[in-house]
Image (cartoon, grey):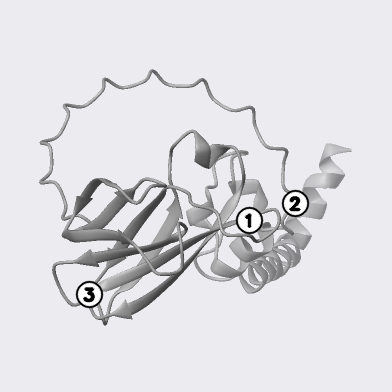
Amino acid sequence: MTRGFGRFLRHNTIALLALFLALGGTTYAASTALIGKNTVASPQVVNGSLQTKDLSKKARKALKGNRGLRGLTGAPGAKGATGAQGVQGIQGVPGASATKLWASVTAAGVLTRGSGVTAVAIGAGGANDYRVTFNQDITNCVYLATGGNDSASQVIPYFLYTARPASDTVRVETWNGNDGTALARAFYLAVFC
């Protein structure tokens, strides 16, 4: 049997060599044509050895999927310690008074406190008609009268009427809040210029 095989090889050596080269060349040509230059096929890659930077831009884009749903909010962190209180700042300069013209008048028409007031008198209208005169022209000023603070003024509710009969005077009238009759009551008056 070996003799027959040896004879077969001697007679067909060139044919076998030609067949071997033909098949080998086809395999080489196919592998180089399909794989291309500077490429690596799956058998040459060790599992887990490729990194994202080794991939093409197209391959990297393909790896990104759709954005998932937003996760739940995490638990709040522990509250930090309160910092030390800072040093108190320097006291600022007191501001100017809102007005320099004001008066506190009793129901009897007596000035108890005031600034810029030259006279307080009961007017011709009766015990509820007061005239407060100031030491300057108040033509372009505004004035505000509010209920005063005495024991009689707190018994019956009352309202006030104000007018300016002269360039330096404010007229204040006090009236019963229940029936609208004349009622002498204490009041405060402020003039803003």
Q: Amino acid at mark 2?
A: Gly
- Disc 2 marks which residue? 68
Q: Position of residue 164 (x, y in %)?
A: 35, 77
Q: Earlier in the sequence, mark 3 or mark 1?
A: 1
Tell me which residue sits at (20%, 66%) in the image. 134
Question: In this rendering, is residue 113 above or below 37?
Answer: above
Q: Tell me the residue that label 3 is attached to.
A: 168
Who is closer to the viewer here, 102 or 99?
102
**Measured from the top left, where is residue 113 in percent x and y?**
24, 45
Question: Viewed as shown, does residue 32 lie left or right of 96?
Answer: right
Marks 2/1: CA distance?
Answer: 33 Å
Helix, strand or loop for disc 2: loop
Displayed quadrant of residue 182:
bottom right
Residue 129 is drawn in which quadrant?
bottom left
> Residue 75, located in which quarter of the rendered image?
top right
Residue farthest to the right, as pictured: 1
Residue 78 spot, x, y in % from top left:
51, 20
Report the side of 51 relative to 71 (left or right): left
